[in-house]
Amino acid sequence: MTERDLFNYALLAVLIFMGAIIQSCKDDDPAPALPAVETHEISSITQTSATGGGTVLSDGGAKVTAYGICWSTDQEPTLDDNFSTDGSGTGEFTSSLINLTSQTTYFVRAYATNKAGTAYGDKISFTTPARTLPELSTTEATNITRSSAVTGGNITSDGGAEVLARGICWSKNPNPTIEDNTTSDGSGMGIFVSSLTDLGADSTYYIRAYAINSVGTGYGQEISFTTSGAELADVETIEVMNITMYSATVSANIATDGGADVTERGITISNDPNPVVEDQSTSNGSGTGSFTTEALNLEPATKYYVRAYAKNSAGTSYGEELSFTTLAPTIPEIETVEVTDITSNSANILSNVLNDGGAEVTARGITWGYNPNPTIEDASISSGSGLGFYTTPFNDIEPSNTYYVRAYATNSVGTAYGNELSFTTLPAELPEVSIADAKNIGKSSAQIDASVDNSGGASVTSRGICWSTSPMPTIADNFTTTGAGVGAFESSMDGLSGETTYYVRAFATNGQGTAYSQELSFTTTALDLYTAGYVMDENDKQMPAYWKNNMLVTLPLPSGAVWGQGNSIYVDGTDIYVAGYVNKTTHESAVYWKNGIAIPLTTHTDYANARAIAVSNGDVYITGHDNYRAVYWKNEVKTTLHDLTSGATDITITNGDVYISGYLYKNGETKSYACYWKNDVVTELTDGSLSTVATAIQVVGANIYIAGDEFHTGAPAEGKYWVNGSINSITATNPRTYSISISGSDVHVSGVDYNGGLPQAGYWLNGTSVSLQSPDYFTALDLIIYDGSIYIAGTRTNGAIRSSVIYKDGTILSETFDSGARGLYLD
């Protein structure tokens, strides 16, 4: 072994020995402990925050990497709860607790963390206060004018809840609140500025800043200030226009109100300069802005001075003065247009006043004569006043004569004439007369419409009708005279015999003789009046019944029935049919009577009713409802018209077609549809947006007429009628319709109108109400037009008093007590 090797071994041994010594020293170091920390008291406690802290007393032999506080509503808060991190190392520290909840108890501990773990200080607790109203102050008012001021406020505390709204409230009374006038100036804390506008001049106002949080509304201190006084309004007289002889239009503008309300404005006008309101003036409302007014009742050709004015609390101010001169009038401008309709004794003169010359045309007409250039000093005919076209009848002149005519018009300036026209009348002839119609034919009387269409050029001194039971009557037979002259007239024939054929001609007589019209014939009638309904018997039982010419026929009750009622009546030859229903205690059954014999239509225990009856070619048709379904029976065989809730109200047969009115409901819907069926095929009249019912039907030619009702939730019903599906309204307060009848182009509807809760007879002609005698408490249930007369049947019910009433032409024909009328038939 060399010396070098010995050295290396010795060096290695030294190094090993020294390493062993160093390791021995390390094994003797102690392990670190948890830090020592104490918790400080909580301060600066608010609703949502507080200040805490602590002191790290010892690091436990290892570096403290984090310290702070932790808090919770639980009693042992840890770092798993809310905590703050406020540094590292040892020593005293301060912490902030945030996002707290008001009126809540919290538990707090300081903590410190080193490599050995986390140590906690003592536990302390505190409670956050309740939220309060915001705290704020009101800023003094500045920039004060007549109508505005600037102020504001400063919100120094939100009371622990977000300030949702802030601003200024003001009033003319102390202690204003947000119930008075307010501004809205954002939200949150801090200073804000607010502008007050639309204030009154020379007025003291009280103001307070306000702030609103979830607790309520807080107010700053009250401050008062007074606005400056009002000034006169700024007025402009703009323009005078549309100047006539008697009027002019003036436009003006109130530019500013001077800081006080303009209570009156208008114009003043005078014949002298500088007019004031004590002169002639107009009043055109109040406030600022432009307006236009009329200066009326002026004098022609006169100079006027005009100024606009405005009044406020400071006084009356005027605009600049304008002047104008009214126009001077002239005579009118007029034209004689043409001569028309020339006969042997008359003509019509068409004229036109083109311009009134600036003065009202007080008279106009024609002048005429046998020589040219007639004036009003000659003969004249007046035709009213004013502008425009007018026609002057020129009557009672001579046949085969030449006449000169001129139109004239007069105003305050004078009389103007139109151009001259001339014409020659025709030679005289016999009159032309025509006969139009025989109407209101009864058993002993009739009325004749006739007309003298042309006088023949000579005055018609007599006109009328003549008649006989033989053709071609003359005035040597029976006759009446009805005035004189041309035009339509109506004559009456009285004292006639029933069921007799009469021949009638109109006549007219002038200086040439008597002329006759074409011949007209008619046959008088024998009228029977039938009514269906009920009568109370001696035991106060309601019995079905009908009347013929006011003679009572009581109908028998079928087996099991306790009372009944007739609804409709029809006469076919010698057979009398009545449709109705009877009550069997638990239900009502449909029934009809033929010549007094009861024929049940239903035998089950459901409710049924026969509402209307008609007979055609020996077949008996009855309509109504059975178990709340619309049905009709033909010769007692039932047909159901609708499978859901529905009802049939009236029936008519025309040219073999069966028409039935009524209503229906659709599946799942709550509003009824007014409708009608033709040969079992339904036609809906309404869209279902409102409940509607068709109550009566009549067919005339190709036209279908239907009456009905429209119902409104929470409002009165409305009466309606349809013509070929086109709806028309009835003038009434709260009507119900029951019958419809047609006369020519006129539609007649009967029913009842609940006017203020009082039932009154309803009768409407083309939708317009027609009054009846003693209408109170009366329901008009059926209506027929016969020979030009209007027959209405119905029932008057006033408490326990009931009566059947028949009207003819609006007057009561008969009234029978302890009974009720529902159906009507005339034969």
Image (tube, grey):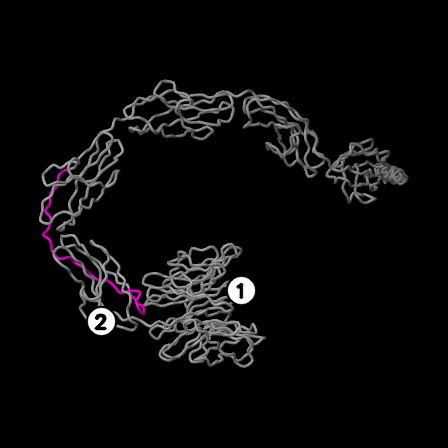
- State the residue position of label 1: 801
User: In terms of secondary structure, where does tag 2 sit?
Assistant: loop
Magenta span covers which residues? 419-446
Q: Where is residue 359 in the image (x, y as percent from the top left)?
A: 26, 31
Residue at mark 2 to residue at mark 1: CA–CA distance = 50 Å
- Image height of 302 relative to 535, above or below: above
Question: Which of the 4 quarters of the picture holds residue 323?
Answer: top left
Q: Crowding at label 2, few (<14), some or many (≥20) Cα neighbours within 10 Å?
A: some
Q: Can residue 681 be seen in this view?
A: no
Q: In this view, does 4 lie to the left or right of 252?
A: right
User: In terms of secondary structure, where does tag 1 sit?
Assistant: strand
Which amino acid is tagged 2?
Thr
- Image height of 493 relative to 554, above or below: above
Residue 430 forms part of the magenta stretch: yes
Q: Where is residue 204 in the image (x, y as percent from the top left)?
A: 60, 23
Q: Crowding at label 1, few (<14), some or many (≥20) Cα neighbours within 10 Å?
A: few
Q: Position of residue 50 (x, y in %)?
A: 77, 35
Q: Position of residue 147 (x, y in %)?
A: 54, 25
Which amino acid is tagged 1?
Ile
Give the numbered dot on residue 469: 2
Q: Is residue 374 left or right of residue 145?
A: left
Q: Which quadrant of the figure contains the C terminus?
A: bottom left
